[in-house]
Amino acid sequence: MKKISIPIYLLLLFILPGLNVALRFFNLPNYFFLLGFRFYGIILLAGIFLYFYIGKEIWKQSLLSFSFKKFCRYIFFVFIPPLIIIGGLFLLNKIELGDPDYFYELGLSSIVDFPIYFFWNLPQFFILFTLMQTVESSFRLKILPNFILLIFFLSPELLTFPKITFNVFTTLSFVLLLVSFSLFSYKKKNPLTFSFYCFTTVWMALLLFGTTSEPLLQTFLAKTYTTWDGFFEINKKFAPYILPSYFLLSLIPVLFLKKES
């Protein structure tokens, strides 16, 4: 099977993220919806490039590696971190159930509609998985190239224009999340399991703790809303540490997963 060369890898790192930054700078949408399906533009473009550069074989291999049996093992895997965090904060009396706007029409309905939103996001996570598997098979350093790829692809979402600000807790959460994605892709070769882990980890964080990111909210929850406060109100002193702690707890079990061939 044809592999990704270093020059092609570098083109992926700079050209597509550069386009993404330009769209963000001019306040143009870098994600879109097609028949309900969610697509982050840069991932879709990378998938189209991969199809013409590598060919059909890599996509056939990814499709053949789908396994519902292995997927079922991880249904409860993603619920451990929020249970630990919420339970611990309740014991410390630092969290309480909130009364956010759109509690029923966005919050509760998102729980009922979880299978639908997962299905709508499945194609783009399948593309991402296939891309990461191709990069992994092309280089001796298995995890690092994919982590760098994700950094370049997704870090523009951290940029705020015209004034660029830096939030250490948001950045730490972002890095921990991408490490877990990269490591999970390396250890588990089922695209359905990878998609479920990645989608549900982010979905759970947004639903429970809220977000002001319109792209995240409209991709993972509902496309007609621009902000969501989350189900829980957290003590202000503890609030900045919630997402880094959540994504760290999501990463730790991945470290102990057995690598599949």
Image (cartoon, rainbow, N blue to C red):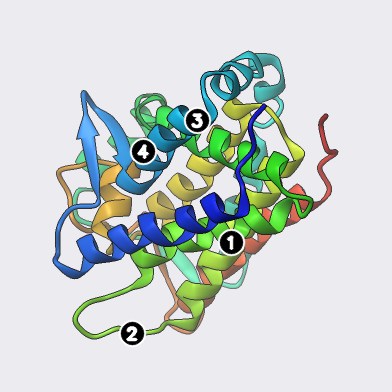
The quarter of the displayed image where residue 106 is located: top left
Residue labelled with disc 3: 126
Residue labelled with disc 2: 165
Nearer the camera: disc 4 or disc 2: 4
Question: Upstream in the sequence, badge 1 or badge 4?
Answer: 4
Give the CA separation, mark 4 to mark 2. Answer: 28 Å
Give the CA separation, mark 2 to mark 3. Answer: 32 Å
Residue 177 appears anywhere in the view: no
Left/right placement of residue 94 relative to residue 43 reads right
Q: Disc 3 residue type?
A: Phe
Q: Disc 1 residue type?
A: Ile
Give the CA separation, mark 1 to mark 4. Answer: 18 Å
| Residue 181 coordinates in the image, percent (x, y) | 61, 49
Residue 6 appears anywhere in the view: yes
State how many labels appear.
4
- Determine the secondary structure under disc 3: helix
Nearest to the observer: residue 257 or residue 135: 135
| Residue 70 coordinates in the image, percent (x, y) | 71, 21
Nearer the camera: disc 2 or disc 3: 3
Question: Upstream in the sequence, badge 4 or badge 2?
Answer: 4
Contact flag, marks 1 and 3 (Cβ < 8 Å): no
Question: Upstream in the sequence, badge 4 or badge 3?
Answer: 4
- Determine the secondary structure under disc 2: loop
Residue labelled with disc 1: 148
Give the CA separation, mark 1 to mark 3. Answer: 19 Å
- The image shows residue 215, relative to residue 113, as above or below, that is below
Residue labelled with disc 4: 44
Give the CA separation, mark 4 to mark 3. Answer: 10 Å
Question: Upstream in the sequence, badge 1 or badge 3?
Answer: 3
